[in-house]
């Protein structure tokens, strides 16, 4: 494995990393934690570019947004006070689900996105938080919505760009904005069979003012359930609406059957986990169902 | 074959190795004789290859050796102090938490990292710290008991040392 690798680079900044990537003629591979790149074991790689020294390990608050450098590890997200203060600590809680402690000390947020897995655990909470990614290429930096990036993450579209950071805008404020993440896996450290993140804001009468539902491992990329979100808005979240939303979500997803679960089972679990997520959100919002 | 230099510290010893740029840390450590670092699944599932990197447990099968440049590594070979076992290792023996031993080195290292960070962990925290280590012999009850026992032993020793210090004063 990796027998053809001729050089291992440790660029000290992103400009240098980008230059190396572009001069690699498609045979250079960016690596950070290694937890995906190594396991994938692509034999054609001739140059490895380790970006963990390129100054991308940071968590900052910039104006009203949270900015997370691409090489920030899951372990760092778990422990960051700034991340604890964002959306009730949602991202810290989800980071704890990303594999064993051994893996979480290596795996990075940027890697979790760039790998483009439909099951990437950090993707659904970030979609719920309307996150964007900042990409750097020869033309400069540009920001694009995470959903748009994920749709192309497994294509060649970004092969000459570097994912620099993830930007999370300030979530809707006020009382009653609550968050949940639900994951079903074979074991506590396994990849998701299905994962669901939800964000919910209720008005003073308990009606849904703002809703986000995102699902992972049930479509080619992590996805928002836009139909279900719309259907909820302006309505009181009661048992009947929960059942309706569960059914709507199951219609919106397009899961596949694989070694871990059948498509039918995944679809059923989408309904169950979405209901649990919304129930958790509304329980914390102290409105009775 | 292209080679490169790697400078790192393993078990307190400053070293200088020649490696291939695509080699994994697990392979290099074993080539250099650190056979306590076990080759298991080679994809970050089993934890047999665990080491401490700057005090934090990681899977050495998931890391390129070149990424260890300038870093501090602790393998299971470096846990005992000369001939004297670490209290964690003694606790594993006392509790019969070792059978074939393949997973043990990694478990001891993850437990050590946990106790260095939290002197009084809950059972849940111990279980979470060991969650990346698969055992096919004894199961997990005994290792969990061993880590909890080692934690309270460490704490008692620290208390005795504190009392002794106060008496001396």
Image: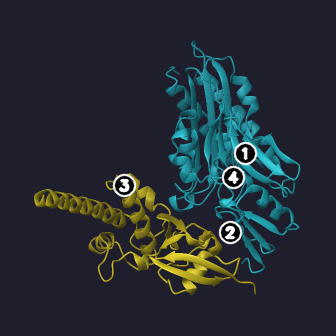
Chain colours: A cyan, B yellow
Q: How many marks?
A: 4
| Mark 2 chain | A
Q: Identify the residue at horizontal 85%, vertical 57% (top origin).
A: A160
Query: In front of the other: label 2 or label 3?
Result: 3
From mark 4 to mark 1, how far is it between C-alphas?
15 Å
* Secondary structure category for the residue under label 1: loop
Name of the residue lying farthest toward the left: B167
B9 displayed left or right of A130: left
Q: Identify the residue at horizontal 66%, vertical 17% (top origin).
A: A235
Q: Name which of mark 2 and mark 4 comes first in the sequence.
A: 2
Looking at the rendered structure, which numbered label has been put on residue A222? 1
| Mark 4 chain | A
B94 displayed left or right of A177: left
Are the residues under marks 4 and 1 on the same chain? yes
Residue nearest the viewer, comparing B65 with A60: A60
Name of the residue lying farthest toward the top: A205
Q: Which residue is mark 3?
A: B118
Looking at the rendered structure, which numbered label has been put on residue B51? none
Q: Which residue is mark 4?
A: A110
Residue count near mark 3 (Cα–Cα under 10 Å), binned few <14, some 14–19, many ≥20: few
From mark 2 to mark 3, how far is it between C-alphas?
31 Å
């Amino acid at each position: 494995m990796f027998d053809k690798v001729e050089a291992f680079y440790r660029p000290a900044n992103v400009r240098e990393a980008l230059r190396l990537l572009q001069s690699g003629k498609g045979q250079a591979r960016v690596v950070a934690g290694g937890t995906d790149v190594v396991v994938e074991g692509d034999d054609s790689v001739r140059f490895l570019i380790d970006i963990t020294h390129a100054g991308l390990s940071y968590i900052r608050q910039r104006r009203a947004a949270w900015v997370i450098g691409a090489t920030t590890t899951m372990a760092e997200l778990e422990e960051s006070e700034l991340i604890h203060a964002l959306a009730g600590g949602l991202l810290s809680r989800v980071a704890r689900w990303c594999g064993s402690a051994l893996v979480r000390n290596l795996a990075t947020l940027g890697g979790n996105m760039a790998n483009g897995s439909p099951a990437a655990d950090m993707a659904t909470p970030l979609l719920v938080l309307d996150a964007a990614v900042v990409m750097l290429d020869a033309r400069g930096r540009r920001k694009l919505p995470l959903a748009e990036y994920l749709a192309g993450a497994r294509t060649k579209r970004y092969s000459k760009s570097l994912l620099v950071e993830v930007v999370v805008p300030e979530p809707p404020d006020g009382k009653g904005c609550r968050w949940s993440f639900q994951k079903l896996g074979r074991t506590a450290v396994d990849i998701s069979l299905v994962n669901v993140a939800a964000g919910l804001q209720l008005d003073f009468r308990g009606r849904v003012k703002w809703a986000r539902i995102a699902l992972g491992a049930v479509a080619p990329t992590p996805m928002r359930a836009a139909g279900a979100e719309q259907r909820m808005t302006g309505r009181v979240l009661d048992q009947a609406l929960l059942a309706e939303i569960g059914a709507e979500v199951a219609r919106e997803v397009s899961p596949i059957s694989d070694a871990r679960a059948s498509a039918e089972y995944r679809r059923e679990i989408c309904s169950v986990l979405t209901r649990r997520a919304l129930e958790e959100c509304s329980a914390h919002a102290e409105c009775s169902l | 074959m292209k080679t490169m230099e790697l400078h790192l510290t393993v078990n307190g010893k400053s070293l200088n190795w020649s490696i291939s740029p695509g080699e994994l840390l697990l392979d290099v450590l074993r080539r250099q004789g650190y056979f306590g670092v076990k080759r298991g699944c080679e994809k970050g599932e089993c934890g047999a290859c665990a080491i401490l990197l700057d005090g934090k447990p990681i899977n050495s099968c998931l890391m390129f050796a070149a990424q260890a440049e300038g870093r501090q590594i602790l393998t299971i070979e470096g846990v005992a102090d000369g001939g004297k076992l670490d209290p964690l290792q003694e606790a594993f023996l006392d509790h019969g938490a070792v059978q074939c031993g393949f997973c043990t080195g990694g478990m001891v290292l993850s437990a050590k990292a946990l106790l260095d960070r939290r002197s009084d962990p809950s059972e849940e925290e111990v279980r979470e710290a060991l969650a990346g280590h698969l055992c096919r012999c004894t199961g997990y009850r005994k290792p969990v008991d061993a880590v909890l026992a080692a934690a309270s032993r460490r704490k008692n020793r620290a208390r005795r040392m504190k009392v002794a210090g106060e008496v001396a004063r």
